[in-house]
Amino acid sequence: MHTITLEIDDPEVADMIIGLAKKLNLGIKTNPQNPKPVTNSEKIISIMKRISERGTISLAIPDPLAWQKEIRQDRPLPGRE
């Protein structure tokens, strides 16, 4: 039997490793250093930071202003038709 200890800063990576260990039927003992639950806004911020670090958003949307005008759909305001 082998024992491996990992220190993981990214909660998403920790979740992936725990999921993999469960699929492989490995024994898991977790000791979270930060028991505070991660909120949706923190998850979104984390994802957006990773996207910006990769630089892939500029490849998908080279001109953000043109993209916004293209997808934005104005609707008439009630009583102002």
Image (spheres, helix red, strand yellow):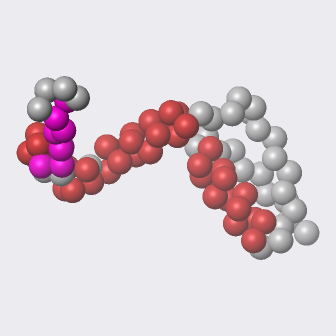
The residue drawn where x is 27% and y is 54% is 56
Judge left or right: residue 64 versus residue 37: left
Nearer the observer, 25 or 73 = 73
For the C terminus, the quadrant is: top left
Nearer the observer, 27 or 3 = 27
Asked if the magenta segment contains residue 66, the reply would be no
Predominant secondary structure, magenta span? loop
The number of discs equals 0
Residue 35 drawn above or below residue 68: above
The residue drawn where x is 91% and y is 69% is 1
**Can you give x and y, in whole percent of width and height, for residue 50 in the image?**
40, 46
Asked whether the viewer can see residue 49, the reply is yes
Asked whether the viewer can see residue 64, the reply is no
Nearer the observer, 32 or 69 = 69
Judge left or right: residue 60 versus residue 36: left
Nearer the observer, 45 or 72 = 72
Residue 74 drawn above or below residue 4: above
**Can you give x and y, in whole percent of width and height, for residue 64 in the image?**
15, 43
Asked if the magenta segment contains residue 75, the reply would be yes
- Looking at the rendering, the stretch of residues picked out in magenta corresponds to 70-77
Quarter occupied by residue 2:
bottom right
Residue 58 drawn above or below residue 17: above
The residue drawn where x is 86% and y is 51% is 29
The residue drawn where x is 44% and y is 36% is 45
- Name, please, the residue furthest toward the bottom: 24
Quarter occupied by residue 20:
bottom right
**Can you give x and y, in whole percent of width and height, for residue 37 in the image?**
69, 33
